[in-house]
Amino acid sequence: MGRRILQLIPVLLGVSLVVFFMVRAIPGDPAQILLGQTATPEAVREVRARLGLDEPIIVQYLLFLRDAATGDLGDSLVEGKPVTAALLDKFPATLELALAALLFAVVIGVPIGVIAAVRQYSLLDRITSVIALTGVSMPIFWLAMVFVVIFTVNLELLPFPGRVGNDVSFTSYTGVYTVDTLITLNFPAFWDVLKHLILPAVALGTIPMAVVTRMTRSSMLEVMNEDYVRTARAKGVVPWRVVFRHALRNAMLPTVTVIGLQFGLLMGGAILTETIFTWNGIGQFAIQSIDGRDYAGIQGVVLYGAVFFVLINLLVDVLYAVLDPRVRL
């Protein structure tokens, strides 16, 4: 375990190096954008000095590493407060959306994958394969706009945009609105929050759902041909027990890995979905930081995504070792 944690350090250093120099390759001067086009050269130079942008770029990077090691990612020009505070403020919104999307992906993807494997080469299996392939190939932004047009504009079933209606009020303790409305027993607000969550969660969860479906089907087909499964059938074990008691548990090992990786991607890759649905999370913060040439904001978001992704990978490895004692970290 200790060796795996030490391996994370060069990964994060590499990410910080790449993002730092790529951010500074973006056209535009943050000081000029902050002050506007009518700012005097003296005012621009003063702001650049205050932001540390007048230092040699190597010095800037070393100072960034020094501050990042202590948890200081600088101040966000867009939010007007430390990047760390901005990320913590927006983290619950992104977490709520990612968990809802992952729940949709697992609840739909795993059963469909199991059924497709059990009924291999049937019409249902072929339909499932087409749906999974379509889901993987579907651009999220296009799918999100289609959902809005159908369910909001035409059918008027679900609200858009935002996380909650303007006429709904409740006290937020955690920043996760579904949890906040439940613990305060505000069920009308919970229903409103839930309706706002459905469209972005389904749009964001479509690709993970397709990936989980394909992996579950593939794993189940492999396991169903193992000797112990054939032995269970030969002993007269009822089919549903063979599938769920003997095959599914072992087939879930690679699926759990995929689910963990998809969660890491969802936490760092909800940028388009959050932007389309005006979801005030980290993805929307990333877009605002890029528009405003907010170097500290962009670096903070990318580092957050990298840290979260490697931690999820580590957690998946630990879980894999728990499920399969033959695996050693």
Image (cartoon, grey):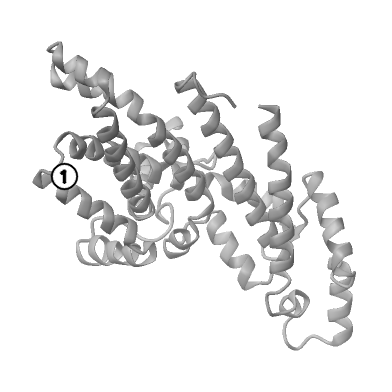
Count the labels in the image: 1
Query: Can you give x and y, in whole percent of width and height, for residue 212 in the image?
Result: 34, 43
Residue 158 makes an appearance in the image: no
Pick whichever, 240 or 154, lies toward us.
240
Reading the image, the residue beneath label 1 is 125
Pick whichever, 215 or 283, lies toward us.
215
Q: Amino acid at mark 1?
A: Asp
Tell me the residue at 35%/60% (across/down).
160
Q: Secondary structure at mark 1?
A: helix
Pick whichever, 119 or 212, lies toward us.
119
Quarter where residue 227 is shown: top left
Residue 200 left/right relative to 79:
left
Tell me the residue at 9%/47% (across/down).
123
Above or below for 203 versus 36? above
Query: Can you give x and y, in whole percent of width and height, for residue 213 in the image?
Result: 29, 43
Query: Can you give x and y, in whole percent of width and height, for residue 175 in the image?
Result: 54, 42
Quadrant location of the C terminus in the rendered image: top right
Above or below for 64 versus 215? below
Residue 152 makes an appearance in the image: yes
Tell me the residue at 38%/36% (across/down).
255
